[in-house]
Image (cartoon, rainbow, N blue to C red):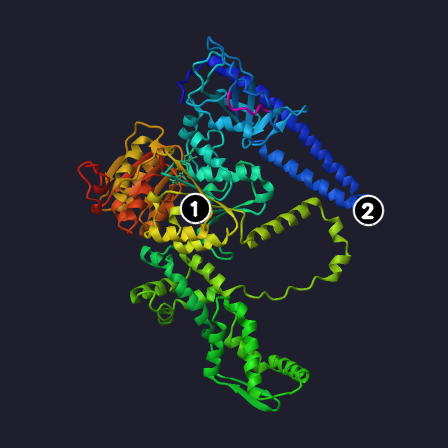
Amino acid sequence: MAAQTTAQPGVRDQEIAVEQAHLDRVYRRLEEKIDEAEFLMRDAAQRGHVGTPGALAERDAQVFRAGVHLNRLNSEFEDFLFGRIDLLRGKDGKKGSDGAYTSVEPADDAVREDKSADIAETLHIGRIGVLDAEYAPLVIDWRAPAAAPFYRSTPVAPGRVVRRRVIRSKGRKVLGVEDDLLRPELTTGLPVVGDGALMAALGQARSHTMRDIVASIQAEQDMVIRAPAASVTEVSGGPGTGKTAVALHRAAYLLYQDRRRYSGGILCVSPTPLLVSYTEGVLPSLGEEGQVAIRAVGSLVDGVSADLYDDPAVARIKGSLRMQKVLRNAARGALDLAPGRPTTLRVVAFGRRVELSEQELAGIRHNILGGTAPVNLLRPRARRLLLDALWRRTGRRFDDAELAAEERQGFDEDISTEQDFTDFLDAWWPVLTAREVLAALADEKRLARWARRVLTPPEVRRVARSLRRSGTTAHDVALLDELDMLLGPVPRPKRREADPLDQLTGLDEVTTFADRNDARRSRADRLEEERTEYAHVIVDEAQDLTPMQWRMVGRRGRTATWTIVGDPAQSSWTDVDEANRARDEALGTRPRRRFTLTVNYRNPAEIAEVAATVLALAMPGMESPRAVRSTGIAPQYAVAGDDLGADVRAAAERLLTEVDGTVGVVVAMNRRAQARTWLDGLGDRVVALGSLEAKGLEYDATLVVSPAEIAEESPAGLRVLYVALTRATQRLMVLAGPGDLPDADGVPDLLRRD
Ligand SMILES: Nc1ncnc2c1ncn2[C@@H]1O[C@H](COP(=O)(O)OP(=O)(O)OP(=O)(O)O)[C@@H](O)[C@H]1O
């Protein structure tokens, strides 16, 4: 970053006043636009009285458009102008559709020999574009091409940008400005204020929700955000490099670029519900809502939400591709589960009893299940083959084909409405739900049968035991989704016919616009819930998806473009090769474009250094991202005494006094419940987390309790510990237990550099 000259206080005030004047102008223009929108709404409402169908349709369309416009303007009001760039004259002098010059490079004569230069263009950047009455840009949308230099320019490749300014405002008031001088060698007369926007943003205290980074996206991040949507964009980078932030900004960018295409929906898959609620606010703050569904991997199947964790050994089995075979057997074998399953079929036809034996029935079943079609969808075929077999058994023969067909039709109608037959079919080929079949796997004997030659007896025991608990894990959800596919849809009961009286009352006509808007919205929500395929799929923390989860996510993006962000060094999944194979299968042969993010914006260097020690153990040879700042505050170490709970509580209390924002206390998974009680009553700035729950989150201060316990939880434990150690933006404290073998300074064995 260029050297900064912090200007005199007088200059700062003067520059704030300059930006305030611009913001005032923007607000005046916005108010004009709001007046226009309100006029449209009023006008449209009056047209409602005209009453001809054409006028009503037009009114609806106008009201809808004006409503959307008004909503948007109102919600964008907060802090929507945040940037400014001052530029040299461009090479070709052409302007783009947003009214700004398009050229990235300066004109050859833009800089005079004595290094003086004139500012030819000043652009303000904000969350949406605003044009003045003459169509000149007052604010450029941050996603427009003209805004790219705001993010892309660096002192090494400044292009036309002389000064980049980040403007802090609240409501209608400009609070401050922070400048970066990108061409310090030039004399342009531009004052430079502040120490740089990035550092100011990083130094702020954290809350429990992620902020957008729209005012300070860095060049390497911008390359990812604006990468063309074709095929698959893969982003890797260490902790804190902004992968999650970048993925979310990319969603907003894609919608801006091609709203029509992405009206097919963008799905963002997150590893935990905690990370979903942490990131949920970012897109609305960028003015995007509705088209992007952020869902935890345990909530991808409608009507189910994971509420339990599997222990690592069970997770490893449930996540592996071996489960495909087990579930295939289960989906078919579950046909035999109905209580009171009949072994023979008896009906009365042409005055005598006709019967199919157990063996014949087994043959028919085998024949039907030969292919790969979903089991529930095979029920009509089962019905037909049963009727065929019964018909053959009657021994009726006809020389006349027409008569034969007629007789057969009559036979089918009679038999298939006979109670004995329908009862038999319901029991012999019941409609199966994924839930029922998964529950059936909880029976160890049954599971052993379905998992023969696939799982070992101890594995069968483990999985069956885990399924006997009440609750669902994220791994179960992937199994449910696989079963949904193997079983096919459950036929829905017919919907109640619409009451004709409803249509006669004319109620529709007197409902308010707001009502209808609500109705529209709930319809959109419903569609969202029912949507099973998306136009773009974003996978956050991709390193954690198990092979079975890749299959589940893959089914939602069969025709989608993808953005996949992750860090192999933070993976809690053990069989990386198998997961990579499943990922390849989900993505098919689509071309991939790869990016790497290299700068850690979260952890100060002092914390990053400790994390690097663990990284060297977890993944020897893997490079750590470069920390962008340092605080001069070393991590603190302490050794727990006899009362671990009291020590954790005291340490958390201390951290709460040391930082203004949040404190995360990370413990081994089996201590989660205990840890929550330890922190009881300390307020909502502090939270207790199991090691796997810390994924993707960040806190101003983190207390990591017994690194050894976390590392020993699973074969991937060292990588999970690496995640825990990289959550803090300001302070890290480590509390060692006896298993940590702390040295005289309290530093656990795993964190020592020797
Ligand atoms: N350009 C930026 N300007 C300001 N803050 C940034 C920038 N890039 C990243 N950050 C901040 O750095 C922190 C880390 O970002 P993020 O959570 O997206 O990283 P990550 O790579 O997903 O991390 P992890 O892999 O550890 O989950 C966040 O607080 C984010 O707001």
Residue 704, image quadrant: top left
Query: Gap in Å between the C-alphas at discs 1 and 2?
Result: 52 Å
Question: Which residue shows up at 75% across the image and 39% down it?
Answer: 44
* Lower sequence index among marks 1 and 2: 2
- What residue occupies the far front of the structure in this picture? 399
Question: Which residue shows up at 68% across the image and 39% down it?
Answer: 65
Q: Residues within 10 Å of mark 1 (few under 14, many from 20)?
A: some
- As for residue 681 lying within the magenta part, the answer is no
Disc 1 marks a residue whose amino acid type is Leu
Q: Is residue 706 visible?
A: no
Residue located beneath label 2 in the image: 52
Between residues 330 and 503, which one lies in front from this camera angle? 330
Residue 278, image quadrant: top left
Which of label 1 and label 2 is nearer to you?
2
Q: Residues within 10 Å of mark 2 (few under 14, many from 20)?
A: few
Q: Position of residue 297 (x, y in %)?
A: 44, 51
Q: Secondary structure at mark 1?
A: helix
Residue located beneath label 1 in the image: 274
Q: Position of residue 547 (x, y in %)?
A: 39, 54
Q: Position of residue 501 (x, y in %)?
A: 75, 60
In the image, the segment drawn in magenta is 100-105
Q: Main secondary structure of the magenta part?
A: loop
| Quadrant field for ligand 1 | top left
Locate residue 24 relative to residue 164 in the image: left or right. right
Disc 2 marks a residue whose amino acid type is Thr
